[in-house]
Image (cartoon, coloured by chain):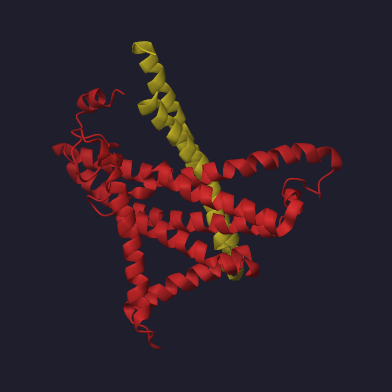
Amino acid sequence: MEGDIAQLGQFIGAGLAGIGSGAAAIGVGHVAGNFLAGALRNPSAAGGQTATLFIGIAFAEALGIFSVLVALLLMFAV
Amino acid sequence: MATEAQGEETGLVFHPLDQFIVKPLFGDMGDPVHWYTITNVTLWMALAVLAIIALFVFGSRGRAIVPTRTQSIGEILYGFTYKMVEDVAGKDAIKFFPYIMSLFMFILFANFLGLLPMSFATTSHIAVTAVLALAVFITVTVVGFVKNGVGFLGLFWVASAPLALRPVLAIIELISYFVRPVSHSIRLGGNIMAGHAVMKVFAGFAAIAAISPFAVLSITAIYGLEVLVAGVQAYVFTILTCVYLKDALHPSH
């Protein structure tokens, strides 16, 4: 692929893929916020659930990282 | 690749992804054997391994009742990982503790060594993390079949679901099982790569006089965040290994 239109589409696509990382930020905030809401109601049970918190954050974040990767691929590898 | 042209347009003197280029440290570029010598990736991976060995050899040398500083750091790391394996994967997964401990130590030290200025972040390469994730994937699959035989396939056949739903769930479970090594490796590699690229972008902003105080402040903040990310990603990689191991040892839902 050559020409300005192809490069335009590449950059627009990379920008659109970047939205995904913002969505992942919302997801991670949702997980952490709900954990805090639950932890403040029952602080004694919160300590045992930090592992679950990190697993949840990791799963939410992985999809955001995928979108960053798509953006990087569009910018540099296509 | 249009990287050089973009670098000139945006006024950056370097490209944010240039730091991830693998270079041989010895030999001339035309020499065909120079790729078989030490590259910057192998150097920093070896340094990570040497740092781990140094910590645990010097830490356990005294075997004091009242631990020295080095010994207590070693004891904290050992106890932390041991408790994680025991809590997440169960008591019968303790025989995999040496493997999980070495994974955790290697990723943790590689992440932190990558944060040193002028160093090379080995875990930012998908090639490095994919090998670690594939090793976990193959280990878990082999252990699952050895421990449970054909019963390991019960992981995909959800017995508690209605019969009509089970084939659909089996396909979803199968896909999610085979996506595991992909997400496992890209999570670590992508996080470290994105963090280091962001730091380089802000370092480029620091060269512009008008916004350089802001850039220096924000690069300090981002560096702090990256220290956190380096620890958390090593923890997440290890704890997901424990979760997968628990699935292999107890495949019933």
In the image: residue A12, left or right of residue B21: right
Q: Quadrant of residue B24?
A: top left
**Residue B85, x across and y down, in percent:** 56, 66
In the picture provided, is A76 more to the left or to the right than B203? right
For the image, the number of numbered tags is: 0
Q: Residue at left 81%, top 46%?
A: B161
Residue at the left extreme of this rendering: B209
Query: Which color is chain A depicted in?
Result: yellow
Q: Nearer the viewer, residue B249 or A71?
A: B249
Q: Quadrant of residue A6?
A: top left
Q: Residue furthest right?
A: B163
Nearer-the-camera pick, B47 or B197: B47
Chain letter corresponding to the colour red: B
Which residue is at 58% across, 54% downward?
B139
Residue at 30% of width from left, 37% of height from top?
B17
Q: Is residue B183 above or below residue A49?
A: above
Q: Quadrant of the N terminus of chain B?
A: top left
The picture places residue B154, in percent across and down from the top left corner, at 76, 50
Residue B110 appears in view: yes
Task: Using residue A36 as the reference point, say whether residue B120 is left or right of it.
Answer: left
Q: Is residue B164 left or right of residue B51?
A: right
Please state, as top left, top right, bottom left or bottom right, where the C terminus of chain B lies in the image. bottom right
Residue B64 position (above or below residue A8): below
Give above or below for B7 relative to B155. Answer: above
Whether residue B252 is visible here, answered yes or no, is no
Residue A15 locus on image (x, y percent) = 41, 27
List x then y, in percent, for residue B28: 18, 38
